[in-house]
Image (spheres, helix red, strand yellow):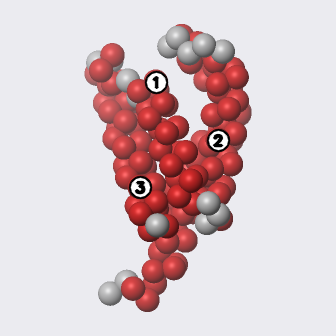
Amino acid sequence: MFESFQNEILLAARLLLGGAFVFAGLRNIQNRNLVASLMTARGVPQARLVLSLGIVLQVVAGSLVIAGIWTALAAACLILFLIAATPMFHNFWNHQGPDRASRINGFVGNVALAGGFMALIAQAA
């Protein structure tokens, strides 16, 4: 049914997945002091450097996904980013109440993003 729109659907998927990371990376630039302090509190060594590298990864890999350039590699890099960032920022097991629910939602959202990137990798192969 959707075969005739495969290219358009794939473009929309790349825009949504890659765009989420470009947006998040730009937002992290704006909130870098807060994010770096959270990372430091969670024991990340050289948090500002790690944050800067993460921002570059988010923006560059997200842009590559959007453009459809080196899509599988960029998607794999963003999966690795999610593996590192998700337990750091969505550690629901350390929280209770509404904060726990919010972190569970973020955790599940990141798992879903990883699934979307896996689909892009499979499609690119």
The residue positioned 52% from the left and 37% from the top of the image is 81
Query: Which residue is tagged 3?
Result: 118
Q: Which mark is residue 88?
A: 1
Q: Quadrant of residue 64?
A: bottom right
The residue positioned 37% from the left and 83% from the top of the image is 2
Distance from Cα at disc 2 to Cα at disc 3: 17 Å
Disc nearer the start of the sequence (1/3)? 1
Q: Nearer the viewer, mark 1 or mark 3?
A: 3
Q: Is residue 104 left or right of residue 27?
A: left
Foreground residue among 112 and 33: 112
Task: Please state which amino acid type lies under the numbered disc 3.
Answer: Met
User: Residue 84: horizontal and vertical position, in percent?
Assistant: 48, 30
The residue positioned 70% from the left and 22% from the top of the image is 49
Query: Which residue is tagged 2?
Result: 57
Q: Is residue 22 visible?
A: no
Q: Count residues near mark 3 (Cα–Cα under 10 Å), then give few for <14, some for 14-19, many for 20+.
A: some
From this view, report whether residue 12 is shown above or below residue 108: below
Disc nearer the start of the sequence (2/3)? 2
Disc nearer the start of the sequence (1/2)? 2
Q: Given the current orientation, which residue lies at the most extreme front position? A: 125
Q: Count residues near mark 2 (Cα–Cα under 10 Å), then give few for <14, some for 14-19, many for 20+.
A: some
Foreground residue among 39 and 53: 53
